[in-house]
Image (cartoon, rainbow, N blue to C red):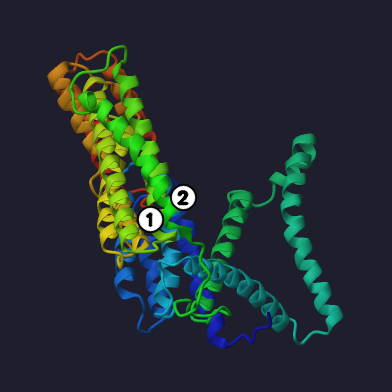
């Protein structure tokens, strides 16, 4: 790829260099808190200044942008370790999808497989652009030199990049091996050694990588892809399944599910356990039913709805009845699994895994309900709804503050039963510690609680405080720990 580098390209490279510095400062200086929304604000400022035009796909684009801001804001308001670790991958992916989406032509369907191809293409084009820009930059720098001199300078520069880190390592080894050499080296100005060369070099390399990545992607967003811009009017060959064969499969599946539901109905909605099963075994059986519903029933529904060709009205009506029956039976098993897990929580307490399982069951109920509507209203799009519902569901997990729900439910359970797992609450980051503080204020004689809080207080006093890691929950709990009389 040959590029003609303009003056404004160099200026924009400087802007991306500043954005690379902001990324390094935000994500590689301690834990992430306030720094994430700060970086997102800086990133989108560059994006909107770079493309001062009417963006496309505004409605879905606005939804994704709200989701990005809510997820980034969760680092400032909450401190869920699991969700924050997931967001380290999910937020950058959503940002990239959003960038490509709002700068792509309106005739691209974001809910089609071809959009995934566009995303991959844009990312590859961005990397190729950065590589070509670096080559063009070197040519411009060495344009007044003859080819032989330019090659010598390039080789010297490469030698410095390789040799300086190697020189630092060898010098350190020689200083350890010979006291006289060490004394001579140490007489050099002290400020030279106040800088951590290895750390500084690593951070500089990160900044350059971020700069080239941002610069390359920004530069190719407005460039039309070599692929066709629209696939909507293109006649596509589709695999189709015969309706009679599919109806046979559905009849067999529904027959098994109906018999299973009828036999199990006497304890599906009963508060009692089956003979011979503990609460744990009972709940796990319900969870495996959920897995089966998810992997089999939902897969069967979506596959058949998209690939089956119905030969006539009667067969079409029969297929819809079979689909509806499959959804209803799946809903019965979901309700059973939901109730079983509730019984398990009442007996053993609330954890993040159990709350997430509950939330996922509710999400599946919504998905099945929409799929039932889609069965009878064929013009509706399943993929559109699934993608939007998935975004809203994942974002909702952050908004409702799951860890606070877990702490509150476990404290309520302690008031009723006198049972609580303080070690699990202590594993829930600062939200769990806040719950332990409340428990200590109500019951300071609880076994081992004082020792846990003393350890957390010591950690809070020794932890460095930086603006990047600022978090409201962390700030609040740290203040309580310091004021706590243990």
Which residue is at the front of the view, 181 or 85? 85
Horizontally, is 465 left or right of 484 in the view? right
Please say if 216 is above or below 33. Answer: below
Residue 426 in picture, x, y percent from top left: 32, 28
**Residue 392 shows up from this direction:** no
- Few, some or many residues within 10 Å of mark 2 (<14, 14–19, 20+): few
Which residue is at the front of the view, 106 or 281? 281
Residue 329 in picture, x, y percent from top left: 28, 40
Query: Quadrant location of residue 410?
Result: top left
Q: Which mark is residue 425?
A: none
Residue 485 in picture, x, y percent from top left: 21, 24
Q: Which mark is residue 29?
A: 2
- Residue at x-position 43% and y-position 51%: 246
Horizontally, is 300 left or right of 196 in the view? left
- Residue at x-position 68% and y-position 83%: 2
Please say if 253 is above or below 202. Answer: above
Q: Which mark is residue 35?
A: 1
Q: Where the N terminus falls, by quadrant?
A: bottom right
Q: Secondary structure at mark 2?
A: loop
Mark 1 vs 2: CB contact within 8 A: yes
First reached walking from the N terminus: tag 1 or tag 2: 2
Query: Quadrant location of residue 128?
Result: bottom right
Q: Where the C terminus falls, by quadrant?
A: top left
- Few, some or many residues within 10 Å of mark 1 (<14, 14–19, 20+): many
- Residue at x-position 72% and y-position 81%: 139
């Amino acid at each position: 790829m040959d590029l003609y580098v303009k003056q404004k390209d160099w200026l924009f490279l400087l802007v991306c260099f500043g954005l690379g510095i902001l990324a390094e400062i935000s994500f590689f200086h301690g834990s992430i808190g306030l720094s994430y929304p700060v970086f997102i604000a800086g990133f989108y400022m560059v994006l909107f200044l770079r493309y001062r035009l009417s963006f496309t796909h505004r409605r879905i684009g606005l939804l994704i942008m709200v989701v990005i801001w809510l997820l980034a804001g969760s680092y400032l308001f909450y401190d869920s370790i699991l969700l924050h670790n997931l967001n380290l991958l999910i937020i950058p992916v959503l940002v990239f999808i959003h960038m490509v989406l709002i700068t792509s032509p309106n005739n691209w369907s974001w809910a089609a497989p071809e959009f995934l191809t566009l995303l991959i293409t844009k990312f590859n084009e961005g990397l190729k652009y950065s590589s070509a820009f670096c080559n063009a930059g070197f040519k411009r720098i060495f344009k007044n030199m003859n080819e032989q001199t330019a090659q010598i300078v390039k080789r010297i520069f490469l030698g410095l990049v390789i040799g300086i880190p190697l020189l630092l390592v060898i010098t350190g080894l020689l200083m350890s091996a010979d006291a006289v050499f060490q004394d001579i080296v140490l007489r050099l100005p002290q400020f030279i050694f106040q800088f951590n060369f290895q750390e500084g070099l690593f951070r500089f390399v990160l900044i350059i990588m971020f700069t080239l990545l941002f610069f390359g992607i920004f530069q190719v967003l407005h460039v039309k892809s070599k692929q066709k811009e629209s696939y909507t009017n293109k006649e596509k060959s589709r695999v189709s399944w015969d309706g009679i064969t599919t109806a046979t499969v559905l009849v067999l599946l529904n027959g098994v599910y109906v018999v299973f539901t009828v036999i199990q109905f006497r304890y599906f909605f009963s508060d009692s356990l089956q003979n011979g099963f503990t609460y744990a075994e009972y709940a796990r059986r319900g969870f495996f039913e959920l897995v089966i519903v998810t992997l089999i029933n939902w897969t069967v529904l979506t596959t058949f709805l998209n690939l089956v060709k119905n030969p006539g009205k009667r067969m079409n009506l029969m297929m819809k009845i079979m689909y509806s029956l499959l959804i209803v039976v799946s809903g019965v098993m979901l309700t059973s699994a939901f109730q079983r897990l509730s019984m398990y929580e009442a007996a053993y307490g609330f954890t993040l895994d159990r709350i997430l399982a509950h939330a996922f069951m509710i999400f599946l109920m919504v998905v099945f309900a929409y799929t039932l509507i889609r069965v009878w209203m064929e013009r509706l799009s399943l993929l559109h709804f699934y993608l939007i519902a998935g975004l809203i569901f994942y974002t909702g997990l952050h908004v409702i503050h799951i860890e606070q729900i877990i702490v509150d439910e476990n404290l309520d359970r302690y008031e009723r039963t006198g049972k609580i797992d303080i070690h699990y609450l202590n594993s829930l980051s600062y939200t769990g510690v806040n719950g332990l503080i409340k428990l200590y204020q109500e019951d300071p004689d609880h076994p081992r609680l004082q020792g846990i809080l003393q350890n957390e207080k010591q950690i809070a006093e020794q932890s460095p405080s930086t603006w990047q890691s600022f978090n409201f929950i962390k700030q609040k709990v740290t203040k309580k720990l310091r004021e706590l009389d243990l």
